[in-house]
């Protein structure tokens, strides 16, 4: 038997209450109405409706205050606010207080059903997520590798095999795939785990300072060297030194790294005494070092010294089965860091995450979860809270729901267009594409030529010329 859903409508207009009841009532949907905010508050706490839709101009206190009071008693309440005079400030304030949506009443004849369906779906997702048990806890995986995919299982095995030796390790993989976490895991499980793990990003330090950072310097070695300073090799003596982005290390420094690997010796900048160190070196790069060697950008002898054991990290798009675990892990990290209640994520939000191709890998996923926690109106993340791709930084483009079937590469799109042109010999592909992209850009920016030109990567004058050539008028385009 289907569960009966309950909607509470609070509005000062009796005719509006009659109309919404008629529109929303069904054998599986019960509608309760009131014109009084105090009564709406009592009904909500007693009946626990799935969704409350409230007008902002209620009495004795407004819908905004009703929302604020309810959020104190029911943090996950799904509340839709309506107003005939929806100012910018009202919209912002309602979102700040945690409203699910803010809708202008003049649009409700066209959007009422869609708005309430979305709110009910969000409530169902929240209920399911709240009852689900997380698959891991932060305490179990604090600052460690997370994953259950076969690709990550192979990485875990490699970490276990190499951790008990002192052989140099080369970790390769795309940016954001977790190379430093792998390096830390090798150190943690090694016999050096009681000593220091020191990391340095070779790409982040200017070339003229990198040698001093690595090997230290003597007093007076250069302007600003007011005292002797130990470098990263000395700091990591007995432990592990992680050289991140080693493919960006200047070639003249590479010979000095080679000497450390061969003899365990180095000299501070400005010094003459050879120092010895017992350091295990783990290097990482997102570059193709074999190609760098072939192009004489990386020393061949250093490459073979570092590449004794190689661990290749898979990109996140090749282990999407790990997305759920990682999302839960990052959610719990955010909650612990900000001292929030334990956050959860809905099944549909997980599907949105799993449909993304993650060019930024695990780092991008972590940043996405952090942003989602900012956007969330409850302690359950819903699909609407997930900012992905350009949608994370721009509201210019129309928003769509992403599914796995929507993930299309540029190559796939080009191939499909070429095949379509072959089927229809009357299609002149390049002019057709120019026209279609111009129309799309104008629609996406509501006819704003400056923004449309920026979206297309052309000047405004070029855009105007295209519109003239293809007979695209601003008015025709927007109303098309």
Image (cartoon, helix red, strand yellow):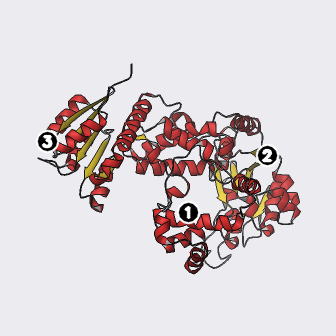
Image spot of residue 322 (x, y percent): 61, 37
Image spot of residue 187 (x, y percent): 68, 43
Image spot of residue 223 (x, y percent): 63, 79
* SS at circle 2: strand
* SS at circle 1: helix
Q: Which residue is mark 3?
A: 36
Identity of the residue furthest to the front in this view: 426
Q: Which residue is mark 1?
A: 440
Instruction: Identify the image quadrant of the N terminus.
Output: top left
Marks 2, 1: nearer the viewer: 1
Q: Earlier in the sequence, mark 1 or mark 3?
A: 3
Q: CA distance from mark 2 to mark 1?
A: 47 Å
Q: Is residue 461 above or below residue 95?
A: below
Q: Is residue 112 left or right of residue 211?
A: left
**Residue 281 visible in the snapshot:** yes
Q: Earlier in the sequence, mark 2 or mark 1?
A: 2
Q: Earlier in the sequence, mark 3 or mark 2?
A: 3
Marks 3, 2: nearer the viewer: 3
Q: Quarter of the image holding residue 427? A: bottom right
Q: Which residue is mark 2?
A: 310
Q: Is residue 212 above or below residue 323?
A: below
Label 1: few (<14), some or many (≥20) within 10 Å? some
Q: Is residue 339 left or right of residue 352?
A: left
Find out whether the residues at labels 3 and 2 contact each other: C-beta distance under 8 Å.
no
Marks 1, 3: nearer the viewer: 1
């Amino acid at each position: 038997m289907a569960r009966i859903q309950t909607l509470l409508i609070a509005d000062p207009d009796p005719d509006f209450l009659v109309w919404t009841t008629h529109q929303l009532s069904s054998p599986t949907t019960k509608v309760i109405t009131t014109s009084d905010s105090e009564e709406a508050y009592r009904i909500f706490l007693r009946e626990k409706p799935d969704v409350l839709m409230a007008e902002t101009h209620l009495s004795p206190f407004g819908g905004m205050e009703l929302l604020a009071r309810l959020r104190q008693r029911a943090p996950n309440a799904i509340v839709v606010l309506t107003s005939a005079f929806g100012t910018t400030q009202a919209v912002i304030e309602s979102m700040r207080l945690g409203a699910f949506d803010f809708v202008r009443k003049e649009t409700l004849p066209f959007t009422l059903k869609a708005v309430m369906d979305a709110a009910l779906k969000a409530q169902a997702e929240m209920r399911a997520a709240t009852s689900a048990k997380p698959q891991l806890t932060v305490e179990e995986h604090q600052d460690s590798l997370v994953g259950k995919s076969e690709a990550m299982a192979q990485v875990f095995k490699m970490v276990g095999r190499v951790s008990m030796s002192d052989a140099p390790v080369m970790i390769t993989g795309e940016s954001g795939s977790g190379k430093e976490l792998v390096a830390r895991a090798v150190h943690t499980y090694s016999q050096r785990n009681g000593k220091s793990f020191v990391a340095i990003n070779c790409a982040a330090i200017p070339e003229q300072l990198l040698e001093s950072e690595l090997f230290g310097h003597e007093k007076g070695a250069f302007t600003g060297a007011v005292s002797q300073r130990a470098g990263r090799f000395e700091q990591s003596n007995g432990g592990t030194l992680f050289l991140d982005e080693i493919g960006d290390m200047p070639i003249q420094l590479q010979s000095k790294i080679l000497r450390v690997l061969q003899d365990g010796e180095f000299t501070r900048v400005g010094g003459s005494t050879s120092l010895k160190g017992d350091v295990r070196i783990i290097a990482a790069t997102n570059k193709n070092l074999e190609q760098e060697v072939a192009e004489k950008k990386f020393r061949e002898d250093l490459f073979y010294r570092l590449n004794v054991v190689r661990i290749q990290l898979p990109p996140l798009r090749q282990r999407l089965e790990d997305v759920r675990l990682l999302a839960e892990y990052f959610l719990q990290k955010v909650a612990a860091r900000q001292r929030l209640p334990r956050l959860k994520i809905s099944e549909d939000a997980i599907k949105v995450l799993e449909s993304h191709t993650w060019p930024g890998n695990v780092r991008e996923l972590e940043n996405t979860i952090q942003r989602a926690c900012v956007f969330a109106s409850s302690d359950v993340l819903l699909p609407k809270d997930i900012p992905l791709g350009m949608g994370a930084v721009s509201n210019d483009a129309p928003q769509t729901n992403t599914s796995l079937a929507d993930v299309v590469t540029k190559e796939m799109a080009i191939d499909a267009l070429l095949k379509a042109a072959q089927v229809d010999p009357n299609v002149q592909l390049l002019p057709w594409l120019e026209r279609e992209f111009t129309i799309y850009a104008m629609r996406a920016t509501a006819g704003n030529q400056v923004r449309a030109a920026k979206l297309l990567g052309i000047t405004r004058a070029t855009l105007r010329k295209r519109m003239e050539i293809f007979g695209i008028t601003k008015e025709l385009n927007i109303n098309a």
